[in-house]
Image: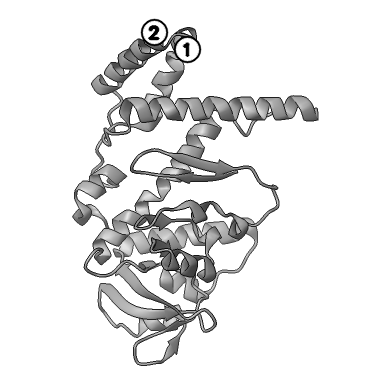
Amino acid sequence: MQIQLDVLHGQLSGALEEGRAADQRATLDQQIPAQSLHLADLGYWDLSRLAALSARDCWWLSRMHTQTQLQTADGRWWRLVDLLAAQGAVTEIDLPVVLGKTEQLPARLLARRVPQEVADQRRRRMRETAKRKGRPISADQLAMAAWTMFVTNVPPSLLTVGEAVVLGRVRWQIELLFKRWKSHGQVDYLPTVQRGRFLCELYGRLLAMVVQHWVLVTCCWDMPDRSLTKAAQLVRLHVLILAKALPVARRLSAALRDLARSVAVGCRLNPRKTRPNTVQLLMNPELAP
């Protein structure tokens, strides 16, 4: 299931594809309007895709694929780990680079050194994952755990390194959307194996999640300090009321207003000191590690 989320307005775009299809084959980003900022997981990393976004006057911000070669302004080609090591003891990097010897895509390399405890935690998780999956872990991977890195085509006048670190965290909202759909909507739990019933249950649950998302957009999307998880739980508590009001526009509007008032009273995000949530970081990027 390929899903694209407009974080500002809540609009969803999506497509069902073959389960074994690679993410790079997805075409949802072709619908992005000019001057929008595109965020995607590394599974979608494709320099030709990023070049196409640049050609359509779209901005993009992406984590850096560690195997991609970079060229600096002096014409020298680098491996990412070697370029980071060459920067010495600096804590932030903002360099104009060219990505890929074949694609030759102009970009900015943005990097911030993380605190030692964060780097140690990352390395511990990397070792645990490598052990669980039976894969070796390289010295280069361990070295790059000391940095948070992005590449972008957004000019320096519009985006600083600190702001990029915060915006990169915004991509996690799509993961939270899938968590709500899977953990609460159970779209990935279909006990039947009969094809017809399987598809009916799948589409039924997806439709329910789309309706839930629509109600969230209607009631609280313009209140960024609200927890969408808590609000989704409230929507499910009101589902019978909404279902009964659905045939009559006036009753549906009244039910949505009641739900919006309930969300306005509660469903607040709990501020965190040690790991600030996305709203806290957007309001104050200096909180980012």
Element at label 1: loop
Which residue is at a point 35% across and 73% down the rendered structure image?
A: 109
Point out the image quarter for the C terminus: bottom left
The answer to which of marks 2 and 1 sits earlier in the sequence is 1
Residue drawn at point x = 49 percent, y = 66 percent: 52
Total of numbered circles in the picture?
A: 2
Q: How is the image coloured?
A: one colour
Percent position of residue 65, x then y: 49, 69
Q: Position of residue 55 (x, y in %)?
A: 44, 68
Disc 2 crowd, CA 10 A, few/some/many (<14, 14-19, 20+): some
Tell me the quarter of the picture where residue 105 sits.
Answer: bottom left
Q: Residue at x 30, y 22 (%)?
A: 263
In the picture provided, is 120 more to the left or to the right than 226?
A: right
**Residue situated in front as seen by the camera: 131 or 74:** 74
Q: Quadrant of the N terminus?
A: top right
Of residues 264 and 60, the one nearer the viewer is: 60
Give x and y (percent) for residue 193: 78, 29
Instruction: Mark 1: give few (<14), some (14-19) or many (20+) Cα within 10 Å.
Output: some
In the rendered structure, which amino acid carries the disc numbered 2? Arg
- Mark 1 lies on residue: 246
What residue sits right under mark 2 in the picture? 251
Rendered image: mark on residue 122? none
Helix, strand or loop status at disc 2: helix
